[in-house]
Image (spheres, helix red, strand yellow):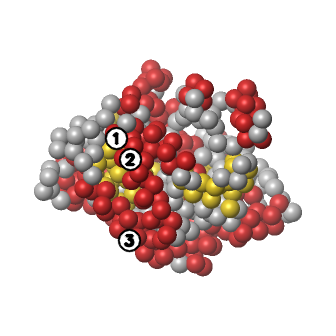
Amino acid sequence: MSISSSLSKRDLSVLWHPCTQMKDHETLPLISIKRGEGIFLEDFEGNRYLDAISSWWVNLFGHCNPIINAAIKEQLDTLEHVMLGGFTHESAVVLSEKLLEVAPKGLSKCFYSDNGSSAVEIALKMSFQSWRNQGKLKKTKFVSLENSYHGETLGALAVSNVALYKQTFAPLLMDVITVPSPDSYHRELDELSRDYAIRQFQAMDAVLSERADEICAVIIEPLIQCAGNMRMYHPYYLTLLRIACDNYHIHLIADEVAVGFGRTGTLFGCEQANISPDFLCIAKGLTGGYLPLAATLTTDAIYQTFYDDYHKLTGFFHSHSYTGNALACRAGIATLGIFQQQGIIEKNKQLAKIMWAAVAPFKEHPNISDVRQTGMVVAIELVKNKQTREPFAWQERRGLKVYQYALTQGILLRPIGNVVYFIPPYIITEEQIKQLATVAWQGIQIAVTD
């Protein structure tokens, strides 16, 4: 038995994998990875896979990046971890300073956690308690968009709207207000995305104006609803939303866990609408894909609603054991350094153009209804009927066939349902982008005709 097969067998006897129907692995082999280098992952047989989805959207600058490696190694010899309750350390302070330098204007405090769902939970709890500390006891509701996704913990799941993840746990979840999405996929044939965003915002504005007294916050994924089939919308929706939240005295939570750190073409998606949220949730790319770290950034105005004598019990009594972990913070510092020192955002603009040129021919495919892009994210939507946009039945798992074919060609793709997408590390080359497009096209051909 090969090392890979042996490891896979051992794995299946002890491990339960995320977002997986484990019975699939009776016929779908696990890929046992030995090492990573740059944009590639390598298995025990020496096969290499181009990581076109950044290992679930986290890896920005390649596996075993020498700059991030060196930073973590240096930190390891000094301090691995210390609790942030009553203590601090330089890496947590420096990372906070650097994050606030590049974050949307007005954000002035960082609260660390371990993952994106936790960052969202913290924002929800902070918003609710901030209003409560001000005596606004009727403010208990949150507003989110159709087709949104904000995480797997119960609060984050409650403000999400993807049935696959939410439906089973519905009886456990708090009641939220859901409004139509500005997702441009549903606009009229000749309608501009901006005009559609304006039209869709009417429903949001109606809810906010009618129920302002009971709403804590609106939570939104800026520009891309990632787990919601990579659907995209015009930034002007965010502009309108910020104005409305100010007018109705409602917090705005920007969940940039997936879209932050350059994915949308700017460091943060909010920049494209020239807005600042009341809470900014970040994770994934924060450490360059190395270690679990998330942060919830907020304003001094919100911070001050908690700041009082202890006996008033207005403090935010929320904690995670590994809050502000020193190793993760040091990786975050190195990640921000690469952005600043290597001009990544400007370089990505050219890469984005190359990606768009590579997928442009897909628009003519008879089973592709839409090819869309925001920054370094490209999505290709497969349908049964191009004219009516009738989707393939989800039970047919067409996207899985693309995934399986791509692996045989040395490419890691992991479609969301019938949406094939590219979210590569920012070190991808023009030649690799062309290779990625070629393999995706071939995989789609197999998937739609099989």
Q: Secondary structure at mark 1?
A: helix
Q: Secondary structure at mark 3?
A: helix
Mark in front: 3 vs 1:
1
Q: Identify the mark nearer the N-term, 3 or 1.
A: 3
Other-residue count near label 3 (Cα within 10 Å), few / some / many at <14 / 14–19 / ≥20: few
| Residue 93 visible in the shown view | no
Residue at 23% across, 37% down: 390
Residue under numbered circle 2: 444
Q: Is residue 300 above or below residue 210?
A: below
Given contact means CB atoms under 8 Å apart, are the residues at marks 3 and 1 in contact? no
| Residue 443 visible in the shown view | yes
Total tally of numbered discs in the picture: 3
In the image, taking residue 127 as reference, residue 359 lies left or right, namely left
Given contact means CB atoms under 8 Å apart, are the residues at marks 2 and 3 in contact? no
Q: Is residue 216 above or below residue 294?
A: above
Nearer the observer, 276 or 55: 55
Q: Is residue 154 above or below residue 51?
A: above
Q: CA distance from mark 3 to mark 1?
A: 27 Å
The image quadrant that residue 51 belongs to is bottom right
Q: Position of residue 277 (x, y in %)?
A: 42, 57
Residue at 25% across, 56% down: 364
- Tell me the amino acid under the disc marked 2: Ile
Mark in front: 2 vs 3:
2
Residue at 36% across, 47% down: 445
Residue under numbered circle 1: 448
Mark carried by residue 353: 3
Residue at 27% across, 52% down: 365
Given contact means CB atoms under 8 Å apart, are the residues at marks 1 and 2 in contact? yes
The image quadrant that residue 241 belongs to is bottom left
Nearer the observer, 252 or 301: 252
Q: CA distance from mark 2 to mark 3?
A: 22 Å
- Tell me the amino acid under the disc marked 3: Lys
